[in-house]
Amino acid sequence: MKKIVTDVLIVGTGASGLFAALHLPADRQVLMITKDKAEHSDSFLAQGGICVLRDDSDYDSFMEDTLKAGHYENRRESVDIMIRSSRDIIRELIDRGVDFAHKDGELEYTREGCHSKPRILFHEDITGQEITQKLLDNVRACPNVTILEQMTMLDFIETKNTCLGVTARDESGEHYAIEAQRTILASGGIGGLYTHSTNYPHLTGDALAIAMRHGVALEHIDYIQIHPTTLYSQKPGRRFLISESVRGEGAKLYNAAGERFANEVLPRDVLTDAIKEQMAKDGKPYVWLDMTVLGREVILRHFPHIYEHCLEEGYDVTKDWIPVVPAQHYFMGGIHVDKDSHTTMCALYAVGETSCNGVHGANRLASNSLLESLVFAKRAAEKIGQNTQDGDMALHGEFDRLSDESCSMITAQEEHLAQMYKREVLEEIEREKQAK
């Protein structure tokens, strides 16, 4: 087994992991590992946009919209932090080269479901790609950051509730013991556990299974969001998302008889239920979405990639209705963290979709995901940068022995480890559901 020593380990190369890396002190050595290619994170797939507080008068409605969408199960302190941090985050993204849409020389805002007013910035219909690629470019220019692709986390190395690093495996099967003073989990969601999902299939919630095995607290892991509108297909694999901003701009939903059956900007969970009910009534595996009402100019300017993808599937959205169906999309639960993204284990942090800081409650408000990920990733990095002693560094003297023990456990279970982790997460989700 090979050994790597670093100051900070970040597991994942999506928006939250990258933003954390950019806010760690330049004198810290940072290692980022990812299960696949660096670009293969769900952050790259986000279409709609990123929310921002328009001005001080927007605070109350932004808060209420987020709480209402989350069925008032949100952690209000976290929502407040996210909203009040949003303008600084947007300014930094622009400074880092992110190109948001403009109209008449000013930033252009769009609206999505459950938002009382337009407050979403966007870049065509690939906002996540625009943000995450620019962050990745910035990180790759940092001399203190190393990225290792095709490196899968297998276990935590810990003692006395202090994380000392992780055990990992590369694509050739070689095992690694990675020792780190601080570890940040930014490993994404759980879409790979589902047959129909908008997520990359390699995102299977491994961090949750490992956390459970080491007694790290989880929160609301049964809170799983289904996106109402993905392009219906009989092909296997990841489902193509039809952004909520399409409906926010005025696209309409129709049943098999060509009749509207729901308000298109309802919260995602409510609209998903309405679509499923209509599908059952129609006896069809989809309903229809009409984008033609937006007009060719709006479609080609705001949704060019949706237009191109649908065209490849045989639908011209400037002329044709398209079949859409709900699919698993987002994970509101995760590893429990505080307002600084610290878990219940010393020296271990979690950010992005892997974590649960309570912002989203029982249902995420559209376009809050990128903002929440960036806000709390920055807070994690700043907390680490303050040199707070949230763990006993003397325990690192035991790293070699503990890493050998972890490797022995992994080796004994490795043939079935991925399936075991999947089963353990799905069983815990079901247990949470039954408990309620």
Image (spheres, rainbow, N blue to C red):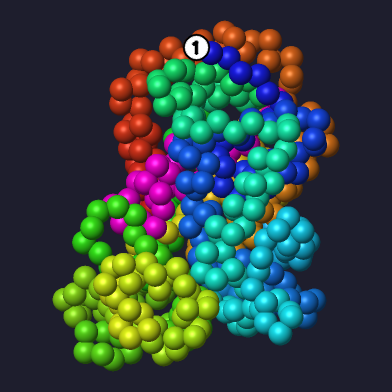
Instruction: Give the percent coordinates (x, y) of residue 140.
Output: 66, 40
Location of residue 61 by image quarter = bottom right
Query: How many numbered tags mark residues here?
Result: 1
Q: Is residue 263 magenta?
A: no
- For the point 62% across and 43% down, the residue is 17
Rendering quarter of residue 308: bottom left
Residue at 74 percent across and 21 percent down: it is: 392
Residue stretch in magenta: 181-207
Q: Quadrant of the C terminus?
A: bottom left
Is 95 on the left-hand or right-hand side of 14?
right
As drawn, the residue found furthest toward the right would be 386
Q: Which residue is more in the foreground, 91 or 197?
A: 91
Q: Residue at x 28, y 68 (%)?
A: 313
Magenta segment includes 188? yes
- Relative depth, front residue between 327 and 31: 31
Q: Is residue 16 above or below residue 396?
A: below
Residue 87 visible, this orientation: yes
Q: Residue at x 47, y 18 (%)?
A: 175
Above/below status of 364 relative to 193: below
Dividing the picture into quarters, in which one does residue 121 lie? bottom right
Q: Is residue 317 left or right of residue 351?
A: left
The outermost residue toward the left is 283
Q: Residue 194's spot in the image, x, y percent?
A: 32, 50
Image position, residue 276 (x, y; %): 29, 72
Q: Amino acid at mark 1?
A: Met
The residue where tag 1 is placed is 1
Q: 134 left or right of 288?
A: right
Against 295, is 378 above or below? above
